[in-house]
Amino acid sequence: MADCKGLACVLFSSWPTGTVITVTTKSGQIIGPATFSLFFPNICAVVLVEEDVITPSSTNTIFISCEDIESVTLTPLKMIQMVLVQSIIKTF
């Protein structure tokens, strides 16, 4: 089994499911915007759900190893919302 210690693993273990992200894989494939759905630290894998923009629309469920992820980008609105929520939590 993979030892889940990389940056992607740290991010996925701290972000709530439902976070909208874009992932760039080590092979250069761009996935997203996609919704972060599940994280499996014991096998170092993540599940993303991506909505296709083609007609008729379809939903892709993507299973990817954290080791294959080069970078993760938060959707700007979600990032602002997360910062606001964190600052509110700190005040209580």
Image: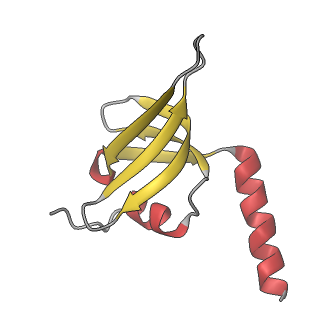
Along the viewing direction, whichever of 13 and 83 lies nearer the viewer:
13
Would residue 22 be found to the left or right of residue 1 on screen?
right
Which residue is painted at 38% across and 45% down in the image? 70
Report x, y in % for residue 90.
78, 84
Residue pushed farthest bottom? 92
Number of disc labels: 0
Q: Residue furthest top?
A: 55
Give the image's coloring scheme. secondary structure
Q: Relative to the observer, which residue lies in front, 46 or 6?
A: 46
Q: Position of residue 46 (x, y in %)?
A: 38, 52
Q: Residue at x 47, y 61 (%)?
A: 12
Quarter of the image where the C terminus is located: bottom right
Residue 18 pos. (x, y %) = 60, 53
The residue shown at (61%, 53%) is: 19
Image coords of residue 36 (percent x, y): 52, 50
Q: Quadrant of residue 35?
A: top right
Q: Nearer the viewer, residue 59 or 39?
A: 59
User: Looking at this view, is 12 or 35 the one in front?
Assistant: 35
Q: Quadrant of the N terminus?
A: bottom left
Image position of 34 with respect to 11: above or below: above
- In this rendering, would 29 be left or right of 34? left
